[in-house]
Image: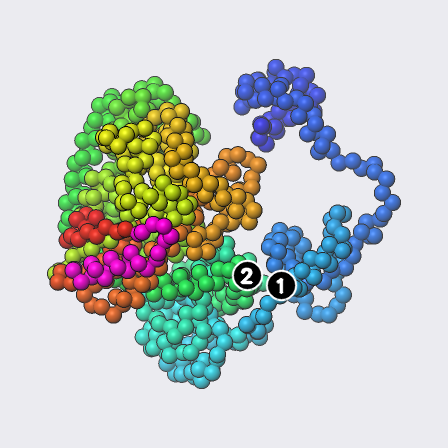
Amino acid sequence: KIGEKKALAIFSKYDSLEKIYENIDDLKNIEGIGPSLIKNLTNEKDIAFMSRELAKIFTDLDINVEESGLQYGMDREKLYSLCKTLEFKMFIKKLNLEEKTQSSNSNSNPKPILLSLFDKIEEVEKTEKAFEEIKYEKELNINFSNRELLIINNETLLNEQKEYLNNYKKIASIYYEELGIILSTEEKDLYFPLNHRGLLSRNIDKYILINFISELNIKFISYNFKALLNLGFTFKSMYMDMMIAYHLISSQTKMDVLLPITEYSKLEAKDFKTTFGKVNIETLLIEDFSKYLSNIGLGILACYDEINHLLHKEELYDILIQNEMPLIPVLSLMERKGIKIDISYFKNYSLELEKELAKIEKAIYEEAGEEFNINSPKQLGDILFVKMNLPSGKKTKTGYSTDVMVLEDLESYGYNIARLLLDYRKLNKLKTTYVDTLPNLVDSNSRIHTSFNQIGTATGRLSSSEPNLQNIPVKTDDGIKIREGFVAGEGKVLMSIDYSQVELRVLTSMSKDENLIEAYREEKDLHDLTARRIFNLSDSDAVSREQRTIAKIINFSIIYGKTAFGLAKELKIPVKDASEYIKKYFEQYPRVTTFEKEVIEFGEEHGYVKTLFGRKRYINGIDSKNKTIKAQAERMAVNTVIQGTAAEVLKKVMLKVYEVLKDKDDIALLLQVHDELIFEVEENSIEKYSKILADIMKNTVKLEDVNLNINISIGKNWAEAK
């Protein structure tokens, strides 16, 4: 229970354990050493000395073997392949395998590798044999050394490559960054400059290139196909999006093309910043950028075989091909369409918020007895905990913490200034994040274009960014007011269709809990029913609004794996009461407990969990000895199975919607916000599409034992349609 800094502080004064314990009472004179640390040392003296004994390296053992006798030869190529397959990344780095295997193509004898004393040759040979058994057929035979890089900046040069590309029938990669596009085949790289702005730069006409690419019968792979679709490109074959494929096998949510290239190829591609530093993009030469981009294009091609193999091995290939790849053009269309906002409405609302914030500011200054910078944590900390002498929470290196948890604690003690500060922060965030920002993001038609990210969450849910339209508060008055600013075009309305309790219905179907199944079969109010069971109410007793709210929070808390402590904090009740609520919930819905245990046991055994449709998420820490880490991993596992399944239901529905509506001019899908889809529909087509879409959402996916119910709302703005 002593960190490195405090240990060093102690050892700088006393150079042995014996001396430390001889002077145990004097440790308090060392800066940073408090009573609790001294108490730990005293109570765990035996462990301290045992730890020292265990850490000793004995050098007097009777070993009659020379170091040279412990070495034996190893084929570096085979070792590299084996380590890649078994994902022994640290061995590859420690033994410099990548560097050596890339540079050594000779048939000379490999240099012996010194392995651990505990390795046995028989075990290594057995592992190599196992590796040989799982070899797979590669689709590509890439030329890495004598590649041709051509810059195609006019139609003549483009036509010169026409015959080659028309006759090329294998996989090619195509990748876009701001300045241009790289197309890599097995033999060569073609760079198409699009947005270079230097004096000597010459770009190819984008529309000529779009038409050219659209006619090619090539199986294209890419990293983020959607970026190319948003430019207007179309493909006869979008064979694999490496971004999504890598996400499926790794649960990685960071968008970075170098991640799969570094992990699954021998290439050393570098990002833009590492390659060019702080170069002015206006002066960047086409020749330099083309070399940089060709390394990435080749890297995407080079990691295809291994990622394709892993997708099949992990039974994730069908998820990619049937769910994720077809969703790319759906999301691209939604992003390009955008949703209209009323700019004047947001400007007026901003003025309202300014007045409200000014009132709250004044009230805060009155409580504090002076004016100060409310947005400065240091000044605010001094006001609250030095001048006003309020009970302080945690202290940071720069002063007192004034985060939300600290202010909420102060508010619970009845301090009015804390309530005012929370209100101020909420309104200020609303104003800066949405009200003032959104009008600056519109196009010439006053439409906002968000980006939908397929790899943004580990559960498989779509996320939204630039701007994030999924984080607008749903229940609060302020959130509703923001939604009023999102409007339909002339002669159109917004239609919102959302699932009723989709995640709870997924839980019901997957857990097979009879009480939950009965509740949904008889179309009972599940929150009302849970309230009755938790609060022991009879059928004739009325459920109060507060009781129903508590039951609703508990119903959803089970999905998100909320602890008694977390539930107590949200409901502002004692932890003991929250524990009792959770206990009663599981007593009423016993199969839910069993289901959650089964999910956790599966995760412990396999290291991942699966949704109903087979999507996997790898769960770090599910076998941890640390109780806190393990509990968090268990909550993550259960949440992934339920939320991930619900997310896939929405994706399947979106694919069906796209299939039915893609050629229609009187309706468009604009947004997806978790379990809600927002359409823009011509007023005279409302009735027709209400029926069509209701049928799609209810019947595209059929869950066992429970129906999927929906709510349809229509209005001139998003608030009315919610």
Residue 685 left/right relative to 380: left
Residue 562 placed where, x, y %? 40, 36
Residue 333 placed where, x, y %? 29, 64
Quarter the N terminus occupies: top right
- Can residue 701 be found in the magenta stretch? yes
Amino acid on which the number 1 mark rests in the picture: Ile
Above or below residue 701? Residue 109 is below
Query: What's the residue at 48%, 45% (across, down)?
Result: 599
**Kind of element beneath mark 1:** loop
Q: Residues within 10 Å of mark 2 (few under 14, many from 20)?
A: few
Above or below residue 672? Residue 302 is below
Amino acid on which the number 2 mark rests in the picture: Lys
Query: What's the residue at 31%, 45% (across, down)?
Result: 520
User: Which residue is disc 2 drawn over?
Assistant: 313
Residue 668 placed where, x, y %? 23, 62
Query: What's the residue at 19%, 47% (across, down)?
Result: 719
**Kind of element beneath mark 2:** helix
**58 or 31: nearer the viewer:** 58
Q: Which residues are magenta?
A: 686-708
**537 or 439: nearer the viewer:** 537
Residue 563 left/right relative to 672: right
- Whether pointer 1 and pointer 2 mark residues with C-beta atoms closer than 8 Å, the reply is yes
User: Which residue is disc 1 drawn over?
Assistant: 134
